[in-house]
């Protein structure tokens, strides 16, 4: 769950010891039609969803997202698109059986891929009590019929297999009652438009930039969660984003694209307009310099990643790997499953990794991965994942594993798709080095290997700076592991023994795997905060510069389109 604005009611753990703190749920329901409809239909379905001689639900949960979006896109000072949308979506988690054994965590059989809540339904955007209940009723009926059949298949499947030490299917959790004030859903579209127009107009002064664009967007919404355990929750949140992109084409046809995205919880938290304009200018000038830079043919040796690309690289490799939870019955775990690596060294001894969603600001940058409660209403916890290079923990939802029986507040996603996932992943180094020391260490390693130069990577360009949502196939979509060619850094430098640097282009990383991270030589002392958003949730990876012992880079070998026949109209006298 996103953390929103001011919470009007405090977390309440049901029980007489703290009864004085209980929020007035009935009063809140009288003010909020959506909440009342969800709760009323929840209570009716819990007692009424039955089929003769089949299991009845032991747990039902509804999550509803009420969202309003706005965006403006612009190019060269002209608006190219604008829009606003409003939607509500509902997902359910219907479970039959018991906490120990239910219909979930099943990967075999005809219905092995079905999960309650995977396919939500659209909801009325008006506060119509009966219409909302109708949608909840229909989804509950559909999902109940699916899960009872799935549960029967799961039990039959298990009778034919040798299954030892299976953990419970669902972890118990203390019910939560928590409400934040509802926020306005209207967006200041003219303000977003003016910012997009002003920033995009910067590129008019750079005719060598073949294409460019700016997108400004805003989101406001409420997330509701109610279940039969007694959880009643509504959180509110907003965010604003500015995305800038540009592309140049070298004379040999190679296209070089850069992207830069910033996120904030309020429009006032965005960098000032003048600073964003300077970033547009810097992007254009960087690309123009790259356009005329020589190509890096091949390299094998130490590689230094600045903090920005290091954070993107770490996100791509590790973000999904830290997610915990049991292997579904009928499936198999992969060889790189981190559940098999607990208490083993997976990173250099000087690296530590913590996921702490409580962090709101790091290095004066808003943390988009901040939240107070996860998407299963479990309070977020700071989790030590790696200590001294050794894997110490995993990020857990309410899906238990043999190693971890309870959630640690990292269940993210919705309904049946909820799984252990990152919030704010922070990488720190003991005996961290400053930028000059890292560069000297790179040169020392190159000297040991009789290399003429080393390589410093300053940016991945498109796909790196803009966050890692482009690598995300679904919540928890990062599964870690190796990835091979096709990862082409944008900004690279040859670093010579005298300290001189030469800008180069056109090479891609042949391979980066877990072993490459484990053999890392050193890390920096200044973190980069990489924010990303997916759907209504935010994610953050914070990491310093990283010096790798050895990576292979090779020239990008492919056929390129010919440059345009005529020069751009912007270049006309």
Image (cartoon, rainbow, N blue to C red):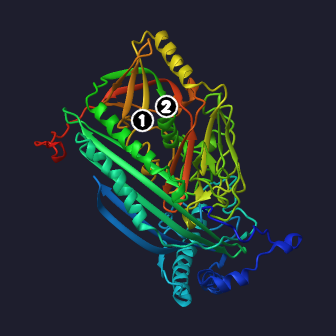
Q: Secondary structure at mark 1?
A: strand
Q: Is residue 58 left or right of residue 323?
A: right
Q: Secondary structure at mark 2?
A: loop
Whole-percent x and y of residue 555?
30, 28
Q: Is residue 175 left or right of residue 550?
A: right
Q: Residue at x 56, y 53 (%)?
A: 368
Q: Residue at x 48, y 42 (%)?
A: 316
Read off the residue under disc 1.
459
Are the residues tagged 2 and 1 within 8 Å (C-beta)?
Answer: yes
Q: Nearer the viewer, residue 483 or 563?
A: 563
Label whose residue precedes the other's in the sequence (2 or 1): 2
Q: Residues within 10 Å of mark 1 (few under 14, many from 20)?
A: many
Q: Nearer the viewer, residue 191 or 429?
A: 191
- Against 452, residue 103 (above or below) is below
Name the quarter where the N terminus is drawn.
Answer: bottom right
Read off the residue under disc 2.
306
């Amino acid at each position: 769950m996103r953390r929103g604005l001011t919470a009007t009611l405090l977390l309440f753990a049901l029980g007489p010891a703290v009864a004085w703190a209980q929020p007035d749920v009935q009063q809140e329901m009288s003010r909020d039609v959506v909440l009342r409809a969800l709760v009323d239909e929840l209570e009716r379905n819990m007692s009424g969803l039955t089929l003769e001689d089949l299991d009845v639900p032991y747990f039902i949960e509804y999550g509803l997202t009420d969202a309003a979006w706005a965006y403006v896109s612009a190019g060269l000072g002209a608006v190219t698109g604008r829009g606003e949308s409003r939607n509500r979506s509902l997902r359910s988690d219907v479970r039959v059986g018991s906490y120990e054994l239910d219909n979930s965590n099943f990967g075999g059989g005809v219905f092995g891929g079905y999960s309650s809540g995977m396919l939500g339904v659209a909801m009325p955007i008006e506060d119509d009590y009966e219409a909302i209940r109708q949608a909840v009723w229909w989804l509950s009926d559909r999902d109940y019929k699916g899960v009872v059949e799935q549960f029967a298949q799961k039990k039959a499947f298990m009778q034919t297999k040798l299954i030892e030490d299976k953990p419970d299917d669902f972890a118990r959790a203390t019910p939560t009652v928590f409400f934040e004030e509802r926020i306005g859903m209207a967006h200041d579209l003219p303000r977003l438009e003016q910012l997009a127009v002003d920033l995009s107009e910067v590129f008019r002064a750079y005719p060598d930039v073949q294409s460019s664009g700016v997108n400004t967007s805003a989101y406001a919404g409420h997330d509701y969660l109610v279940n039969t355990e007694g959880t009643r929750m509504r959180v509110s949140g907003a965010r604003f984003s500015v995305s800038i992109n540009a592309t140049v084409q070298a004379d040999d046809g190679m296209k070089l694209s850069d992207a830069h995205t910033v996120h904030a919880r309020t429009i006032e938290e965005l960098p000032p307009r003048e600073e964003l304009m300077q970033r547009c200018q810097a992007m254009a000038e960087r690309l123009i310099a790259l356009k005329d830079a020589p190509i890096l043919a091949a390299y094998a040796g130490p590689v230094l990643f600045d903090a920005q690309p290091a954070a993107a690289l770490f996100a791509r490799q590790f973000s999904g790997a830290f997610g915990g939870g049991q292997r579904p019955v009928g499936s198999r775990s992969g060889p790189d499953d981190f559940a098999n690596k607990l208490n083993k060294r997976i990173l250099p001894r000087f690296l530590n990794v913590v996921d702490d969603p409580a962090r709101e600001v790091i290095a004066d940058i808003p943390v988009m991965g901040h939240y107070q409660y996860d998407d299963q209403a479990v309070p977020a916890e700071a989790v030590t994942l790696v200590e001294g290079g050794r894997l110490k923990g995993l990020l857990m939802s309410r899906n238990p594993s043999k190693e971890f029986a309870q959630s640690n507040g990292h269940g993210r996603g919705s309904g049946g798709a909820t799984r252990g996932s990152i919030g704010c992943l922070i990488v720190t180094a003991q005996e961290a080095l400053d930028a000059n020391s890292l560069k000297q260490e790179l040169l020392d390693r190159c000297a040991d290997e009789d290399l003429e130069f080393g390589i410093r990577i300053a940016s991945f360009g498109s796909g790196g700076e803009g966050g890692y949502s482009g690598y995300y196939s679904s919540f928890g979509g990062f599964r870690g592991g190796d990835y091979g060619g096709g990862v082409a850094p944008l900004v690279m430098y040859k670093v010579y023994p005298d300290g001189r640097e030469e800008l180069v282009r056109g090479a891609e990383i042949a391979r980066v795997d877990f072993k490459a991270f484990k053999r890392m030589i050193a890390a920096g002392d200044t973190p980069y905060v990489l924010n990303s958003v997916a759907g209504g949730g935010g994610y953050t990876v914070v990491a310093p510069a990283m010096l790798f012992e050895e990576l292979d880079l090779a020239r990008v070998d492919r056929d390129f389109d010919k440059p345009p026949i005529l020069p751009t109209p912007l270049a006309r006298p």
